[in-house]
Image (cartoon, helix red, strand yellow):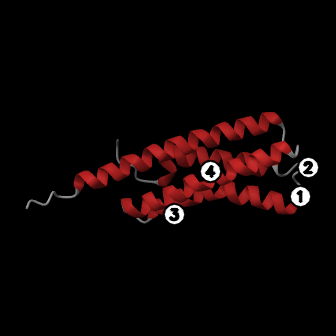
Amino acid sequence: MSKIERFEDLEIWQIAKEIAVEVYRLSEYEPLKSDWGLKDQIRRAALSMSDNIAEGFEYNNNPDFVRYLTYAKGSSGEFRNKLILLEATEKITKEDYHSLYEKSLIFSKKTKKLIEYLKNFEKEKKPIKHK
């Protein structure tokens, strides 16, 4: 894996940004537009994914980045839960639901892989202590 210099270059950040942009666009139309509480919650959940990646990356160390990636992955679960409820209450279309749900699953899987990679990298770089 090549060294990433900016969080904006991370594929998972790009996916999270795309999700947030879609959510902002969707929430500008009825019936979501008038439901202030739900609109705010789904926006916050969507933004939390990319926010946590950006914040964790800027600490410039893998243990902190892994912690924030874990938060971002958790936010993806929260986001999917809200999507399920929005679709069930017909606040979003089935098409929008499926599109966002699939992107969120992809985000979660790729984030999990990056977390595992970084954890393994940290294990391998620690010196082995001999007895």
Q: Secondary structure at mark 2?
A: loop
Residue at the spot of label 1:
35
Front residue (pair 92, 84)? 84
Where's residue 49, x and y in %?
Answer: 60, 55
Contact? badges 2 and 3 (CB < 8 Å): no
> Which mark is nearer the camera, 3 or 1?
1
> Which mark is nearer the camera, 2 or 4?
4
Residue at the spot of label 4:
76
Q: Secondary structure at mark 4?
A: helix
Residue furthest out toward the front: 131
Label 3 neighbour load within 10 Å: few <14, some 14-19, many 20+? some
Q: On the rendered image, what quadrant is the C terminus found in?
A: bottom left
Q: Secondary structure at mark 1?
A: loop
Where's residue 111, x and y in %?
Answer: 50, 47
Residue at the spot of label 3:
55
Q: Going 76% across and 52% down the picture, which residue do you hit?
A: 24
Look at the image and tell me whether residue 56 can be seen.
yes
Residue kind at label 1, given as amino acid type:
Asp
